[in-house]
């Protein structure tokens, strides 16, 4: 039998969560209102307390303390989030992602028609 995804392990939880977080960035306005900016900042901070992989959450809180979340625009947030994801990639020995292309991966689709 293939490994079960029920309940999700740290990897399955991570993949699903990055999909949600990058998709929130992709749908965030280019020019958010003050209240949209403060909602996103609150969400990121609460997320960092509630994420149910506690060592992951602790490192993420440390990252937020070092690199303050940028919520002034879609591209600012998307690039900040990409940097946060790359920080985890480095820790896990995974390849770094080219953050100039985050919108192609998560919003518009790759120019060559791929999705990953
Ligand atoms: P994932 O890292 O889940 O990435 C999914 C897809 O996102 C990739 O296939 C790629 O297309 C795209 N992608 C990759 N990098 C970027 C980027 N920088 N920007 C935009 N898109 C990108 N796991 C641990 O073992 N220890 C931890 O401490 C840990 N901390 C985590 C903290 C957070 C906040 C989250 C959400 C997850 C954390 N994880 C941690 C899980 C880990 O990041 C991966 O999700 C998991 O290892 C599965 O990896 P994956 O190779 O399937 O791809």
Image (tube, helix red, strand yellow):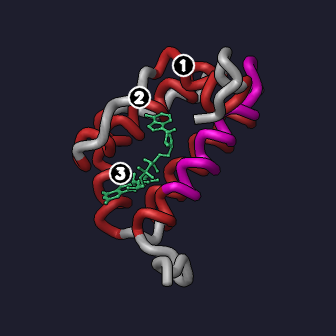
To which quarter of the image does residue 112 belong? top right
Residue 34 visible:
no
Which element carries disc 1, helix, strand or loop? helix
Q: Position of residue 33 (x, y in %)?
A: 76, 26
Q: Residue at x 25, y 49 (%)?
A: 92
Label 1 Cα crowd, 10 Å radius (few <14 / some 14-19 / many 20+): some
Q: Is mark 3 within 8 Å of ligand 1?
A: no
Which sits earlier in the primary sequence, circle 2 or circle 3? 3
Disc 2 target residue: 97
Disc 3 target residue: 61
Which element carries disc 3, helix, strand or loop? helix
Q: Is mark 2 within 8 Å of ligand 1?
A: yes
**Is disc 2 in contact with disc 3, using a CB cutoff of under 8 Å?**
no
Q: Residue at x 29, y 65 (%)?
A: 55
Residue 1 visible:
yes
- Residue 91 marker: none
**Is disc 2 in contact with disc 1, using a CB cutoff of under 8 Å?**
yes
Label 2 Cα crowd, 10 Å radius (few <14 / some 14-19 / many 20+): few
Magenta stretch bounds = 15-31
């Amino acid at each position: 039998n293939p490994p079960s995804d029920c309940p999700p392990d740290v990897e399955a939880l991570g993949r699903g969560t990055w999909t949600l977080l990058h998709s929130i960035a992709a749908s965030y306005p280019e020019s958010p209102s003050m209240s949209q900016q403060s909602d996103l900042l609150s969400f990121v901070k609460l997320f960092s307390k509630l994420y149910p992989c506690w060592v992951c959450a602790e490192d993420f809180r440390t990252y937020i303390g070092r690199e303050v979340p940028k919520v002034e625009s879609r591209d600012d947030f998307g690039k900040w989030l990409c940097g946060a994801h790359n920080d985890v990639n480095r820790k896990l020995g995974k390849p770094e992602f080219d953050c100039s292309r985050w919108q192609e991966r998560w919003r518009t689709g790759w120019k060559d028609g791929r999705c990953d």
